[in-house]
Image (spheres, rainbow, N blue to C red):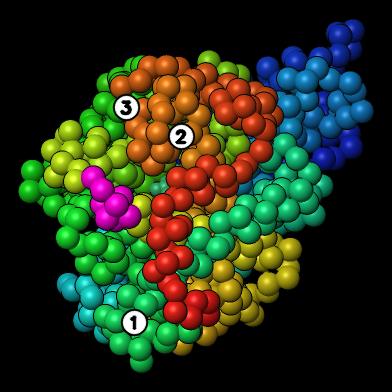
Amino acid sequence: MLKTVAGLAGLAGALALAGAAPAAPAGSHPESPEQFLARTTRDLEVLQIEQAAATWTALTYITPDTQLLNARGNDRYLARLTQAVEESHRFDGRTLAPATARAFLKMRLNAAAPAPHDPAQRARMTTLAAALDARYGEGKYCPHGPPSCQNLDQLEAVLAHSRDYGELTEAWKGWHDIGAGMRGDYTEFVALANQGAREQGFQDLGAMWRSGYDMPPAQFEADTERLWQQVKPLYDSLHCYARAKLAAHYGADKVPPAGPIPAQLLGNMWAQQWNNLYADLLVPYPAAHVQTADAALKAQQWDARRMTESAQGFYTSLGFPPLPPTFWERSMLTRPRDREVVCHPSAWDMAPGDVRVKACLEPTAEDLATIYHELGHVYYFLSYAGQPLLFRDGANDGFHEAVGDAVNLSVTPAYLAARGLVPPAAGGHDALIDQQMSMALEKIAFLPFARFIDLWRWQVFSGQITPADYNARWWALSRQYQGIVPPVPRTEADFDPGAKFHIADNTPYIRYFLAFIVQFQFHKAMCAAAGFEGPLYACSVYGNPAAGARLHAMLAAGASQPWQDTLQKLTGTRDFDAGAILEYFQPLREWLAQENQGRQCGW
Ligand code: X8Z
Ligand code: ZN
């Protein structure tokens, strides 16, 4: 069961062994599938609560001891899940009620990293997983010895704000070099998790991951490619525009007019979202004064609590309840001064009624969006809490990631202005294009990144990419999809994938690609439920309980039915589709087509 979102996602594994299941006691009736599920999930729930506590502690207080306990917690959970999956095969070939069959499926797909059957190998795998997380959390760049070390927040701030080529390159390299130390552990981890997946009857771990979408894995692959082709022309024109502006600032020697863009220049450590370049380098019409919330958040000294209350206020305006008191008591919303933690934001479904967020919020527009995003997960947890354990999950993992983002699409300039976070919207063509640009740098720039990460990992798991070319193939995909290259030559002594949280943490990533498409479908449906008439980009469902009720109905279903059924209830359609995102960005698409005339696009 996926307990954390972007956390150690319920490491578990299983092996089907004939005769492994204990026979029913003599004279008793054999256990029904439903009785089996009830007994199994009772055990799993207890172990899951222990595992969540161990993992939470390990990621909010990194020490060798908490790492050990984290690995042990996962190990115990995995051992029981493995046994459960083995035993479940005694019902193979039986006609099962649909909900029962679905519960078995969810149980078999439960783990992001299924362990091998052998206890020693399982223990090794959980130890490696805990170590990779800790290494990521502790990562630092120490150019002149320990007192001058910079952690990820500090290095990310350089990427966001510096416009000095050399300084950017140094911060980029400083962080990415932390990956090298993970290469050996990651290689070994991949082999063990793959073994777990194979023992469970999957071709490899990538095939297992692709089996979680209520359609044949091959169709899922075709669907993601279809979506990418729908949005690629818009990405290409955004790349073309950004590259021209960057070349004007850094010089054509640094940003060649027809080539890929150096990764350190895009305002983000992974070049995955480019909105930090909006205000000074990429704003189309500076005179229109379309601002982000950054300045006001700082000037008004918003702290993490206030940012989180603001997000909560959005959800309660839709009719959701206030967060439980334990959320405020137990969450980690800022970076502690006295210990090492994994700051990457995540939401946690610890135990019934115990939901939390772990983040290191700073008063920035980016982090304000992050906390609205994380509360989307939290309200999903609270909404499906009444489901049986194996259905307490997103309709699919893309849905889980899309809820808070769909809400963020209602955080419009008008919404922010009403809260004193930006000046009142000016209106008019120029302001609209600025606003669209700001959104596109967040939403469109991300798509090829989210597309390629798991293409890399699927090929790693299938063996098409071997450790001997982990890094080269990572950058080949980045270049192909994003049109981005590393700022300095990289070799197989490096392991740049490890410098991205979701690789170190083994969190699947295609979920974000799906989420960035489907969140516009959610937004459109909620706007329709609210009776909004007008262009999609102008809609905010803030304060609209009718939209909230539709959202809640979707969240409450959890994973109890195929996601297509759940989507249909909200949107009337059964497919992921890029129509809504393209509709949202229609004004920018037209503007970019004009703006890029005479430029050579592509790389
Ligand atoms: O990891 C996250 C969330 C946690 S669920 C903050 N995101 C991806 C990332 O940071 O790489 C949100 C967008 C993409
Ligand atoms: Zn998330």
For the residue pair 326 and 97, the one nearer the viewer reads as 97
Vertical placement of residue 431 versus 152, above or below: above
Mark-to-mark CA distance, 1 and 2: 35 Å
Main SS of the magenta part reads: helix
Q: Which residue is mark 3?
A: 542
Tell me if I can see residue 399 in this picture: yes
For image coordinates 38% across by 84% down, the residue present is 255
- Dot 1 amino acid type: Ala
Ligand 2 quadrant assignment: top left
- Relative placement, left or right, of 80 versus 497 is right
For the residue pair 348 and 380, the one nearer the viewer reads as 380
- The percent coordinates of residue 461 (x first, y second) are 69, 62
Indicate the secondary structure of the residue bearing disc 2: helix
User: Mark 1 vs mark 2: which is more N-terminal?
Assistant: 1
Q: Which residue is mark 2?
A: 523
Q: Which residue is mark 1?
A: 247
